[in-house]
Amino acid sequence: MAGETIRIASREGGAFDCYVAVPAGEARAPAVVLASAIHGVDADIVAIADEFASRGFIAAAPDLFWRTLPGPLPGDDKRAGERSQPRAERIRAGEADMADTLAAVRAMGRANGRALAMGFCHGGPYAILGPKRLGFDAGVSCHGTRMLDSIGELEGVSRPVCVIWGDRDHVAPAEVLDAYRAVPGRMGNVEVTIFPGVKHGYMMRGHPEAFDQAARDYSMRRAVEMLAALR
């Protein structure tokens, strides 16, 4: 189901692009806001958004890098590294964009007002930050990076959060996985799944060296189940 790119006004001034896919029909639906990897809103993110729309949910994918390097980057573009530095500042700036996107989605006539934040790689932390303080009702992180920076943000979060990795993810070393494995034992709202033999970037068909169909299917299924609970 093809969507369209719209412009969303930033609370800081200016505006940014956001790919939006809306399901067929007239029923109100929950939304998923996709926080991309450093490659931006590329063909993989668009395909994921379209898949959610085909399953009956509104999907929005904002350009979180519009302030410096707008538009998608190919996976081998040397500039891609610039997008992740300085990391903390980019994540904070992206919080405003995720919140502005959520507000824009909620203003749509088809939206029921409830939403899930789903992050990939660089965007992984928004699965926690979204429910923590941006107004999202749930969060899913797929092969998120630098997630130890955000683990403390789980304190006080009561909404559902699902974190998924492969154990061969080169940017999620053993200490990261072990730290998150310990969380569900004390927080019943947090789910952590780690797939054996799966690499970083398993969600992205455009990266065949890492893509894993079983892990992708599981991640989409859990996101759809969480969205269904928001109807």
Image (cartoon, rainbow, N blue to C red):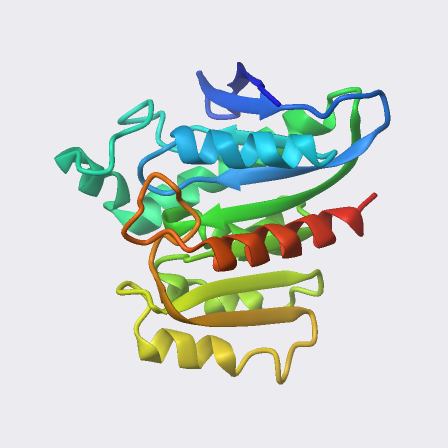
Pick the residue in front: 190 or 51. 51
Measured along the vertical axis of the image, is residue 167 above or below residue 116? below
Residue in the picture at 46% in, 54% down: 125
Residue 160, horizontal then vertical, whole percent: 68, 61
Q: Quadrant of residue 157?
A: bottom right
| Residue sitting at the far right | 27
Measured along the vertical axis of the image, is residue 49 above or below residue 125? above
Residue 128, horizontal then vertical, whole percent: 55, 57
Residue in the picture at 48% in, 29% down: 46
| Residue sitting at the far left | 78
Measured along the vertical axis of the image, is residue 4 above or below residue 212? above
Count of numbered marks: 0
Quadrant holding the N terminus:
top right
Q: Is residue 200 something that shows in the picture?
A: yes
Residue 186, horizontal then vertical, whole percent: 63, 83
Quadrant holding the C terminus:
top right
Pick the residue in front: 148 or 208. 208
Measured along the vertical axis of the image, is residue 129 above or below residue 37? below
Position of 146 with respect to 155 (left or right) is left
Residue 199, horizontal then vertical, whole percent: 33, 62
Position of 68 with respect to 185 (left or right) is left
Q: Is residue 58 something that shows in the picture?
A: no
Position of 10 with respect to 116 (left or right) is left
Pick the residue in front: 87 or 189. 189
